[in-house]
Image (cartoon, grey):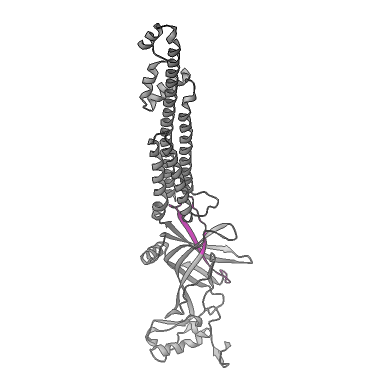
Amino acid sequence: MSMYINHKGTFLLSFVAQYSSTLLNCSNPDSPSMLEALKPVFNLNAIRPVVNITTVTNIGISITVFGILGVVNNTFINLKSIQTVSDSWVSLLQKWQNEFTKWDPEECGTSRMSVPRTNLWLPDIIINEFMDENTAPKVPYAYLLSDGTVSDSQPIKAITSCKLDIYLFPFDIQNCTLSFNSYTLKSNALQLYLKETPERMTEYSKSRMATMGEWELIGIAAKKYTLPSTASGSYDEIRFYISLRRQAMLYVANLLLPSSFLITVDLFSFILPPNDADRSSFKMTLILGYTVFLLMMNDLLPATGNAIPLINVFLSMCLAMMVASLLETIVITNFLCGSSNYSRAPRWIRVLFLKILGRLVLTEESKTLEQKGPLGEDKTLQELRSLGRVLQAVRLQVEQHLSKSLSTEEWVQIGLIIDRLLFILYIIFITVSFITIIIIWVVSYNAA
């Protein structure tokens, strides 16, 4: 027998064993009589609802994900490393047995009754990954069933820590963990178990999903652990692994497609004459526009940690190729503009560029230039030579002029061949790089 003092200062005698061995007595089959029968039980809300203190209270836990609000902050500091914060809307359902709240449904007129949560003993189940206060509205009532089961469902605005792997961004899949355990009670007093299967929780969550933002729920996995306590004994912990897939369409439309379009425009700018100033101006304008674009879209990119996302490699490669294209244009333009000051190209350069590489890059003009030779024995020149010494000076001037023109044309043709060759290498490098990045994205995405 135990003695209790209620808030009015009166004495209340209660046999604790009575509430387990016998049922609650209702004077009438209505709610007021049921509430009156429960009043002595409400005075026991400070103790775990078991008759024998050695009896273990089993808490069944299941969750429903109603909404994924997204990432609150890009980074935060926890006990181990820099991570990210996920914001989701979760419903937590807990069920356990209260040995003091059993009654006959026919005698009391109901098999289920809602009572204020403050009148019942509640387990101190916490989420270890919580990073901020739960701002979800509190549900003031819990349900009592006639067999002694207590059903307590509470909404949770879970702002929790998540390890963020951004290597595949924006085609990444993130796994966030919610760990539930009692803060004070060990396994010899309280044990946890899964109330629903992970498949059932996943199916129900997807059917009730209201808010996803940029994230899509893939699935929920769960596992129970028995972990050693810092003192003595052990405690139960249930971990829910929530898999989320990022909705990539926003980033594809705002980052990947514009970058692909701009690099394509830069590619086709090779069609412009390399000795024209408009080509260099066009490429510089393109680089300036792409730089401004990257600065404007910088907020869409994740803060990098230990790993560099593939999208950063992609964007950096696009910018690097544009800069390399501009440098190539500057070099070729300078080469062509100064070709009039060069002496005639050596024979091995003429053979390599005008014959071999010229045919390789499909430049036909090189054949005509090579066939001309150093200076043909024109009939006019032969007649001029026969006129005598008087016209010899004129002939020498003409030869020097024609030789210089031929040398200039050869160097111009060599420059055009080099420009065409670099254009082909530019196409090959972009194609191989893009295909490689896409393959890495696809393979890593499927592996995840």
Q: Quadrant of the N terminus?
A: bottom right
Report if residue 163 lies within the magenta region: yes
Give the residue at x 42% y 10%.
Answer: 391
State the image coordinates of residue 366 (x, y, percent, origin top left). 38, 22
State the image coordinates of residue 284 (x, y, percent, origin top left). 46, 42
Foreground residue, 304 or 3?
Answer: 304
Picture quadrant of residue 390:
top left
Question: Considering only vertical position in the picture, is 112 above or below 278?
Answer: below
Foreground residue, 381 or 147?
Answer: 381
Foreground residue, 187 or 208?
Answer: 208
Give the residue at x 42% y 56%.
Answer: 245
Picture quadrant of residue 221:
bottom left
Q: Which residues are magenta?
A: 160-187
Q: Residue furthest right?
A: 231
Whether residue 48 sits left or right of residue 366 in the image: it is: right
Report if residue 403 lies within the magenta region: no
State the image coordinates of residue 342 (x, y, percent, origin top left). 49, 23
State the image coordinates of residue 200 (x, y, percent, origin top left). 39, 64
- Total numbered badges shown on the rendered structure: 0
Question: Considering only vertical position in the picture, is 86 above or below 445?
Answer: below
Question: Considering only vertical position in the picture, is 236 above or below 304?
Answer: below
